[in-house]
């Protein structure tokens, strides 16, 4: 299979892998391995280089299918061959038929659902294979609910989270810190409780992520549990590059915070200060989570965190639960050990 005409490709980043063309134009800046690892591959056959690279996970290989160019379309618009490609090896795959859900029938599992319709009501129909399906990522739009007013509530721009929570954090801490401003010892005590709240959040983050968001699912888990899991976290693993579903919506977050805070307020000293610290920890977590998906870190620590989180998504879904801190991964022995790189990754 040959390379599309340059003017028709519109300068797209197109590569060839095992006789199939892939358009990576929209994927380059999302690539967990960085954009610089793709350097020099545009309009070339990357098969040999790909095979020499560290092995890709099953989830990564599944995601790669999202960028496959239809063989007949590619063949119709080709003119010149890829650099280093043997013309005798090129061949076309037969056009795949479509199923009732408007998906091409291939080796993927996406024919099980209809991506043109609301996804949440469909989860009950795939409970026997839901756990396998949800951990096979795709890069496409996902509609969770049918009614627009419900769907709107599931999408949150990143800036809405600090806009909502910073005034809440300030108000929770203001009264007690104001009264202790002239007392250095009391101010030190309150600062300690604030930091305790931050530490408490890191434990809560790990606990929720490991035992709630990644609850063990089986083929007989039932439609309610599978649907609940997909709504709170499964959709993030299914469509990890959806920028509007990377942070937690403030209103459900406020309800969850109230549920957790109410019983703790009866047993903790200075509960509002502890709450302020926990909310501050949460805010840092949510902003960091968004940044790890869409940011271009240059500091070594943040590069490590980005790699760590992407490994959780694509190769170690049962470990690496800490996002804002690896502390509890170390404590509970779920830490992901990353290999050392010979160069620094970048995403722009």
Image: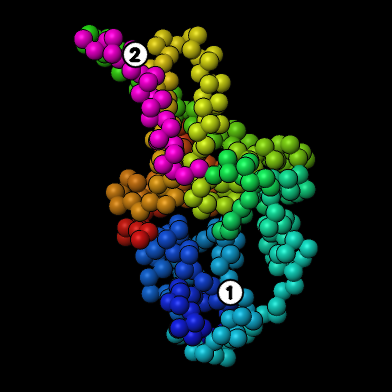
On screen, residue 202 versus residue 181, left or right, reads: right
Return the x and y of residue 26 as percentages of the image width and height: 48, 65
Return the x and y of residue 129 as percentages of the image width and height: 73, 49
The structure residue drawn at horizontal position 51% and vertical position 24%, both measured from the top left corner, is 257
Does the image show residue 210?
Answer: yes
Does the image show residue 317?
Answer: no
Return the x and y of residue 165 as percentages of the image width and height: 42, 30
The structure residue drawn at horizontal position 30% and vertical position 52%, both measured from the top left corner, is 298
Of residues 245 and 146, the one nearer the viewer is 146
Residue at the spot of label 2: 175
Q: Is residue 221 above or below residue 171?
A: below
On screen, residue 110 versus residue 17, left or right, reads: right
Q: Is residue 140 above or below residue 324?
A: below
Residue at the spot of label 1: 69
Of residues 49 and 12, the one nearer the viewer is 12
On screen, residue 85 versus residue 37, left or right, reads: right
Label 2 vs label 1: CA separation? 60 Å
Q: Which residues are magenta?
A: 156-182
Say few, some or many: other residues with alpha carbon within 10 Å of mark 2 (under 14 / 14 to 19 / 20 or more).
few
């Amino acid at each position: 299979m040959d390379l599309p005409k340059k003017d028709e490709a519109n300068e797209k980043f197109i590569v060839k892998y095992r006789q199939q063309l892939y358009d990576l134009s929209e994927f380059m800046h999302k690539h967990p391995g960085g954009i610089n690892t793709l350097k020099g591959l545009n309009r070339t056959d990357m098969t040999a280089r790909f095979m020499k690279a560290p092995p890709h996970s099953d989830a990564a290989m599944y995601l790669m299918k999202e960028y496959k160019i239809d063989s007949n379309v590619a063949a119709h618009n080709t003119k010149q061959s890829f650099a280093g490609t043997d013309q005798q090896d090129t061949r076309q795959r037969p056009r795949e038929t479509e199923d009732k859900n408007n998906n091409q029938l291939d080796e993927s599992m996406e024919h099980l659902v209809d991506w043109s319709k609301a996804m949440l009501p469909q989860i009950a129909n795939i409970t026997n294979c839901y756990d396998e399906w949800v951990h096979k990522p795709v890069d496409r739009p996902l509609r969770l609910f049918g009614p627009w007013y419900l769907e709107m509530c599931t999408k949150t721009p990143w800036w809405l989270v600090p806009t909502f929570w910073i005034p809440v954090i300030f108000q929770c801490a203001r009264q007690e810190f104001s009264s202790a401003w002239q007392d250095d010892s009391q101010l030190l005590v309150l600062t300690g409780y604030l930091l305790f709240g931050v530490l408490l959040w890191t434990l809560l983050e790990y606990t929720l992520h490991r035992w709630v968001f990644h609850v063990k699912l089986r083929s007989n888990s039932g439609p309610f549990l599978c649907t609940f899991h997909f709504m709170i976290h499964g959709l993030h693993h299914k469509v990890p590059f959806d920028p509007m579903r990377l942070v937690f919506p403030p209103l459900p977050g406020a309800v969850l915070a109230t549920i957790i805070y109410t019983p703790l307020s009866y047993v903790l000293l200075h509960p509002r200060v502890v709450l302020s610290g926990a909310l501050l920890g949460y805010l840092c977590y949510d902003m960091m989570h968004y940044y790890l998906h869409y940011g271009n870190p240059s500091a070594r620590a943040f590069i490590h965190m980005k790699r760590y989180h992407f490994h959780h998504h694509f190769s170690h879904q049962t470990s690496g639960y800490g996002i804002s801190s690896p502390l509890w991964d170390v404590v509970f022995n779920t830490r992901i050990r990353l290999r050392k790189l010979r160069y620094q990754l970048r995403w722009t």
